[in-house]
Amino acid sequence: MLACGAFLMSDRPPDLDALLTPGMHYVPFTDPAELRRRVTHYLEHPDEREAIARAGLEHVRQHHTYEHRIDRLMEALKARERTR
């Protein structure tokens, strides 16, 4: 979603905060009541919603490309070889 420039509102799956900054790249919620409040807020504040979507898109473009994934995979493989 972020790579398409979409606004992301999500519960907090494990490790998401290690990849994205809550409130900057996406909007987290913890329960249905908080989700309802946040949906209402961001529907009433499209400028904030669009800024978060843009920040998420830029973050993904800078840090989460196929090239980044391949680099991490190669580093893991090299580390594994060193331990053998």
Image: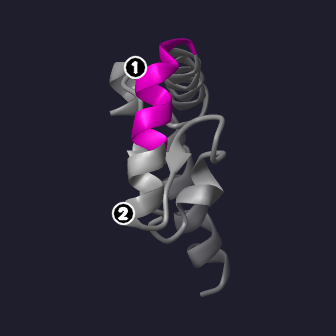
Q: Identify the amino acid type marked 1.
A: Gly
Q: Nearer the viewer, mark 2 or mark 1?
A: 2
Front residue (pair 39, 80)? 39
- Residue 18 on image: x %, y %: 64, 58
* Residues drawn in magenta: 38-47
Is residue 51 magenta-colored? no
Q: Is residue 1 visible?
A: yes
Quadrant occupied by the N terminus: top left
Q: Is residue 51 above or below residue 9?
A: above
Q: Is disc 1 surrounded by few (<14), some (14 to 19) or many (20+) residues within 10 Å?
A: some
Q: Main secondary structure of the magenta part?
A: helix
Q: Residue furthest bottom?
A: 84
Residue to which mark 1 is pinned: 5
**Mark 2 residue type:** Pro
32 relative to 71 in the view: left or right: left
* Label 2 residue SS: helix
Marks 2 and 1, how far apart at CA: 25 Å
Q: Say which residue appears at 59% left-offset and 51% top-offset.
A: 19
Q: Can you tell which mark lies on residue 32?
A: 2
User: 81 or 37: which is nearer to us?
Assistant: 37
Element carrying mark 1: loop
Quick check: is 40 in the magenta stretch? yes
Can residue 8 be seen here? Answer: no
Please report the residue visible at 40 percent of the width from the left and 25 percent of the height from the top. Answer: 43
Q: Is residue 79 above or below residue 28?
A: below
